Amino acid sequence: MQLAVRSIGRLLKQPWLVYALACVVVAALVFIRTYQWDRTIQAFDTALQPKGSPPPPNTRGKRFFLDNDPYYWITYARQMVETGQWRIRYTYTDNVPYGREVHWSQSVSWMLVALGYVRHLLTGESMRDAIEATSIWLNPFLLVLFAIGFSWLISRRMGIVAGAFFMVTFVTVPDVHWAFHPFHPGHHGLHVAFSLGVLLCLVFGGLGWVTSQGTGSREADVGRGLRFFRPLQLVDGVEAGRYFAAAGIFTGLGLWIGATVQFFSIGSLIAGAVLLAFFVPTQLTTQDNNYIPELWRVWGMWASIVGAVCYLVEYFPSHLAMRLEVNSPLYVISVFCVGELMVQLTRWRLGNWRMSIFSCLKIVMLAAGVALVPLLFAFGPVHWHNLRDLQMARLHQFIMEFYTYQKFNPNDPFLTWFVKYYGTLPFFLAGALALSGPSRTKLHEWAALWISFWLCVFSLLLTLWQVRWAALHAAMSVWLMIVVGHIAWRNVLNMPTARRPVRLAVFLSALVLGQAVFFTAREFSNLSDICKGKTIKTQFIDAAMKMHLAQGLQAESQGKPMRVICEPDLAPALYYFGGIQTVTSYYWENVQGLHDATAFFTDHGDALARRIAKERGLTQVIVPAGDRVQMLFNVIETGNMRVTDTSPPLATRLSSNTGELPSWITLDESLTRVGRQEFNLTTARGVIPLAGRVMVYRLESTEGAGQLTGPSLP
């Protein structure tokens, strides 16, 4: 017992060792959790087997994913390897036979290729298989990288306790975990990480405030190196410039990954900074602190440089597209103007701004540059932003990440918010308000508290509007927790020893750590129940049935090319597992495919549908039983859930198989058997029979129509 106490005592004298152990624990947790998810998916895939005959061989894809995006990321990465191209700017996965442009950032596909190449060298398996096998490790690797990187930054400025609490909470809160989920590889985690990186760097850079005493005097007061607790202090102008430059780099990278998402983050952050500078409860400069407006110019300059370089990396020299959905020179100009406008506004607040015709004209031009993107979105060319297309906007009502929070959690949204997703984190909003008084916070602490509180509230409102912002809100909530806890503990240390509420502080700390344990234990318990067949996940069933459908159709077609028109949710799996090209998909680059699919399924006769089928050389139409396809395309066409016309549209006639079909559309018996194949799902309670509910129709032969003009398909 004494030996253990002595060992703990020695450990506590080495803050760097405590931090290193925390990093090892967090990394181990993330990778063990990934391994457990992989085992769970494999166990479920084994438990779900076709009746009668063995499943066809997995020649294209061996595992299903929990979202549609990964199928495209992996397809693009494989295409890079097979064609030798390092940028995929055009794809034939959908909008058959014409294909469509690809404007996604290539970053995720590049990382998939890199990880796949490492596995290829180690195992000797083909790059095609290696890319898929390593894809589930991409997000966990990024999560560990950003969690440890950000916690190291926090530990240097606030102490390793704050860094460790951030790291543990960040990797366990459910919404951040979903953004970095192993079976959800994509750009969502990068959106969160780069937005959080901007905030951290601006806060540690003082948000414009710097110390008059120099960073050296600050370090002399609290000591160098890692410490368990380090009060948050201002830095000098040179170091603040480095932090603002780093924030600009994160902003530019965020524009590269997803300009639309990043622009929301930039807008909310700058709005918070303006409010902070104009309504701070004291003078901007004091005897110990200065405010340097030009720091915002450093941020804007680096953000625009990195954003411009990334744009050229993606598009130069032959695809210099001007799109508002992704990074473009328009965003680069706007971000630069934002930084310069912040300089002018804060100079005016300081009283250093001189009134003149030139200065007023400069303000007007900068404001116009800031408003450039919103104005072009509202009034610019329609083809610059496809969400201005009415049908594309209506389609987004059926994409889950665009649901409102109420629609996503209709039964018990309030309780679910606390128990399932955020735990104690929402209560730190109240903690921020409690600490906002001038007697409890110093000027720079108040600034950090305000901007963190503002972004947490703003991201909360975004999440209530669309659940795709939930991971960003979770990350901002974790950071707000760190700021509130840090300032509160600094207040505790300023109290006389006898009056310090140490027990309360220990209890709250244990509550936060207990929350991380609860989230982790709950997830491992759920995964164990799925492996043992005690729990059935409909999400798994849906993904696995799509995989079996695509593989079965490929096997039954015996090498004959298939060009299919179907609902957009089915398209990614059909191509990934079966090499089957489709007309429509969920992606905004495929407006042409959406228009034609909508016209086809909502045709109340058959002339328009037949013309589309002939022009595209379509061979089959796939529809599930029920009214889902009818409702989907009727909403896209008319905006209404119900069909009001007396004559039923083609989608209704196909789904019900009433026999009122035109002569050029006939039921394909062999492929429909694949679509209605029966399965056995082995569970702890016994075998549960399942069956597909898909019908496949054969379209009249259209030899010579819709010939593919692009390269051969992989």
Image (cartoon, helix red, strand yellow):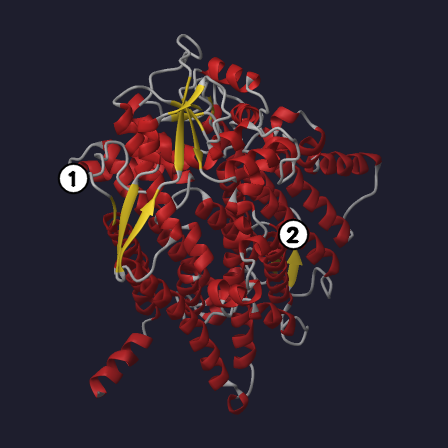
Residue 634 location in percent, x, y?
60, 34
Residue on which disc 2 sits: 292
Q: Nearer the viewer, residue 245 or 619?
A: 619
- The amino acid at mark 1 is Thr
At 49% from the left edge and 13% from the top edge, which residue is drawn? Answer: 615
Where disc 2 sits, the SS reads: loop
Residue on which disc 1 sits: 123
Q: Nearer the viewer, residue 339 or 659?
A: 659
Residue 280 location in percent, x, y?
71, 62
- Left or right placement of residue 564 versus residue 339 in this view: left
Q: Residue furthest front?
A: 659
At 50% from the left edge and 83% from the top edge, which residue is drawn? Answer: 504
Q: Quadrant of the N terminus?
A: bottom left
Q: Nearer the viewer, mark 1 or mark 2?
A: 1
Give the answer, above or below, for where 711 lies relative to 632: above
How packed mark 1 is, by other alpha carbons closer than 10 Å (few <14, some 14-19, many 20 or more), is few
- In the image, which disc is placed on residue 504? none
Where disc 1 sits, the SS reads: helix
- Residue 43 in view (yes/no): yes
Give the answer, above or below, for where 287 lies relative to 559: below
